[in-house]
Amino acid sequence: MPSSKNSRPSGFSLVEIVLVFAMMAIIVTASVSNLLGVRNKYALDTTAEKIVFDLRLARENARGQKDGTAWGVRLNNDSNGKFFEVFSGDNYASGVRSLRTALSSGVKFLTPAEGTNADVVFAKVTGLPASSYSITIGSENLASITKIITINANGTITY
């Protein structure tokens, strides 16, 4: 018959339970932060694709002489909102606006700077931009996640 002095109680000690919960908290925290990073990157990629689509649409409309005029995209980053918008005409102010898209949640313009806007205008027939331009968008939550869209002097759009 075993003596009661030599037997150990079964179960987990408080220290073991606390260690397990601490490890679980670390794993959950890492998983959630990784998930947020993936979500932010997806929103940024999707927004970049939409901007590139609208830029290419404006360029092709200008090349095809749709409505007999130049076409462009307004990048708006001021108190009127954070959006990009396709327009026909030599400039946004006197042009005809056709397609406005708000920036995705969690995405912001870095270029053009806060409080400003920019127009990328493509000449009719040639589809060439008035000048080269870079558009930078970034995550509102993670400063390290950015996307740069470049329009060169030949009208090539890359990101």
Image (spheres, grey):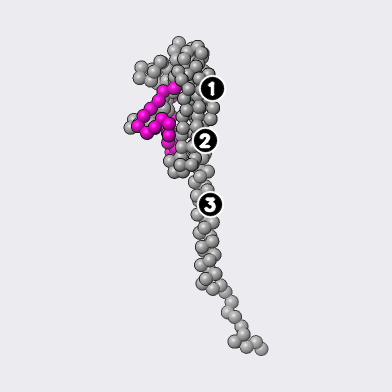
Dot 2 or dot 1: first in sequence order is: 2
The stretch drawn in magenta includes residue 108: yes
Q: Earlier in the sequence, mark 1 or mark 3?
A: 3
Q: Amino acid at mark 1?
A: Thr
Q: Disc 3 residue type?
A: Ser
Quadrant of the image occupied by residue 70:
top left
Q: Determine whether the residue tagged by mark 3 lies in a helix, strand or loop.
A: helix
What's the distance in space between the residues labelled 1 and 3, CA to CA?
39 Å
- Choose mark 2 or mark 1, whichever is in front: 1
Closer to the N terminus: mark 3 or mark 2?
3
Task: Tell me where residue 32 appears, x and y as whole percent.
Answer: 50, 51
Kindly identify the amino acid type of the residue bearing the numbered disc 2. Answer: Asp
Residue holding disc 2: 45
Judge from the rendering whether residue 89 lies leftward or rightward of residue 26; answer left or right.
left
Q: Are marks 2 and 1 in contact (CB under 8 Å)?
A: no
| Residue occupying the far left of the picture | 79
Q: Which mark is residue 156?
A: 1
Q: Residue at x 52, y 55 (%)?
A: 28
Main SS type for the magenta part?
Answer: strand
Identify which residue is drawn at 47% across, 13% down. Answer: 124
The stretch in magenta equals 98-120
Helix, strand or loop status at disc 1: loop
Residue 9 in view here: yes
Residue drawn 52% across the image and 63% down it: 21
For residue 90, the mark is: none
Q: Is residue 17 above or below residue 147?
A: below
Q: Which residue is mark 3?
A: 31
